Image: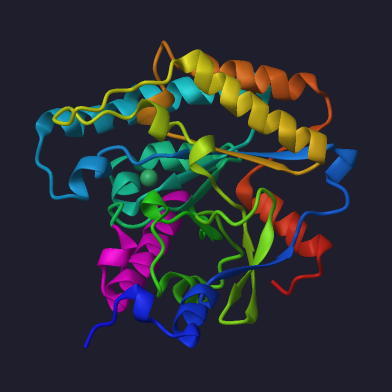
């Protein structure tokens, strides 16, 4: 008989909580080149998979995804190039297969292409063997397109199943960027055991989606002015700078890559680079550095 949560005994909820846990902090004593803090910018290039993953066949919504590639990505690239900033792009395999030249050229310019599922599926709705198959096929697809095997993952919608961490360990990924337990990098612990995998934590606060997304057929509309979003992101960065930690931001080409919103990235990067002592790097480079500093076995 299925128990209600209030009927669970202590081992039940302790085991549940202990399955994936934050271990020791991997915030290094110093960042490369004496930098005051680290900045990890990520862009989740979901493109058409936002519609495809739910089995949607709306031509209009597919074209919204296409905008992310046609207009969002080039606009974001121009801002990154102006600041000499390297970033991480997390790309569902289907999105990468639809836009291979985009991924190949980003990788050739020194940006990182990371795992972001097959078709932006929700991991908690999949059988474990299907999730594993999709993760492995996604890594193969990205490697074929970019010439580089992905070393890190961001689960679609930050949805993390009971099987996800085991698959990442089997694939020998060096980092994940889907969990929330800290501001700064930490080692992921599985059932009490150190995994050697670096977590670069995310947060909905540092994501453009919750501020701007709209469901055409729901009552909710975007309620946060772009200036306010910039203000939140800037304060998150200022806090990371003051604490000598990590500032990690998630944006989407089909959300931020607009004429009225791109200034958020532009002004944020102006603010960051004007400090003169921030290390702006890909997730992979930051994870590798933290792992080395902590003597983590790779
Ligand atoms: Zn996504």
Task: Judge left or right: residue 287 versus residue 127.
Answer: right
Quadrant, the C terminus:
bottom right
Please say whether residue 132 is visible from this viewpoint: yes
Q: Position of residue 271 (x, y in %)?
A: 70, 19
> For residue 242, which quarter of the picture?
top right
Residue drawn at the location 49% of the way across and 87% of the way down: 11
> For residue 108, which quarter of the picture?
top right
Residue drawn at the location 27% of the way across and 23% of the way down: 221
> For residue 291, which quarter of the picture?
bottom right
Colour mapping:
rainbow
Is 225 situated above or below 11? above
Q: Position of residue 9 (x, y in %)?
A: 44, 85
- Magenta region, residue range: 122-146
Work out whether residue 64 or residue 148 is closer to the camera in this orientation and state it. 64
Residue drawn at the location 33% of the way across and 63% of the way down: 123
Please say whether residue 279 is visible from this viewpoint: no
């Amino acid at each position: 008989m299925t128990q209600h949560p209030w009927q669970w005994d202590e081992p039940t909820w302790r085991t549940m909580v202990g399955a994936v846990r934050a271990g020791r902090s991997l915030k290094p004593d110093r960042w490369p080149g004496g930098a005051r803090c680290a900045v990890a910018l990520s862009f989740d290039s979901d493109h058409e998979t936002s519609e495809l993953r739910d089995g949607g066949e709306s031509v209009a919504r597919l074209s919204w995804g296409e905008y992310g590639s046609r207009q969002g990505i080039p606009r974001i690239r121009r801002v990154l190039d102006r600041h000499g900033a390297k970033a991480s792009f997390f790309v569902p395999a289907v999105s990468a297969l639809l836009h291979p030249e985009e991924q190949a050229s980003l990788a050739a310019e020194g940006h990182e292409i990371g795992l972001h599922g097959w078709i932006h599926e929700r991991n908690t709705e999949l059988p474990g063997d299907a999730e594993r198959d999709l993760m492995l096929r996604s890594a193969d697809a990205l490697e074929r397109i970019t010439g580089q095997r992905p070393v890190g993952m961001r689960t679609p919608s930050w949805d993390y199943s009971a099987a996800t961490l085991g698959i990442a360990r089997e694939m020998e990924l060096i980092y994940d960027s889907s969990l929330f337990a800290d501001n700064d990098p930490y080692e992921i612990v599985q059932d009490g055991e150190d995994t050697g995998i670096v977590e670069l934590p995310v947060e909905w606060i540092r994501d453009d989606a919750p501020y701007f997304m709209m469901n055409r057929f729901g009552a909710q509309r975007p309620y946060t002015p772009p200036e306010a979003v910039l203000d939140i992101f800037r304060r998150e960065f200022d806090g990371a700078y003051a604490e000598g930690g990590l500032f990690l931001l998630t944006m989407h080409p089909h959300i931020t890559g607009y004429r009225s919103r791109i200034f958020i990235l532009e002004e944020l990067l102006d603010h960051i680079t004007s400090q003169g002592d921030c290390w702006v790097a890909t997730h992979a480079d930051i994870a590798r550095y933290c792992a080395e500093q902590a003597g983590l076995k790779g």
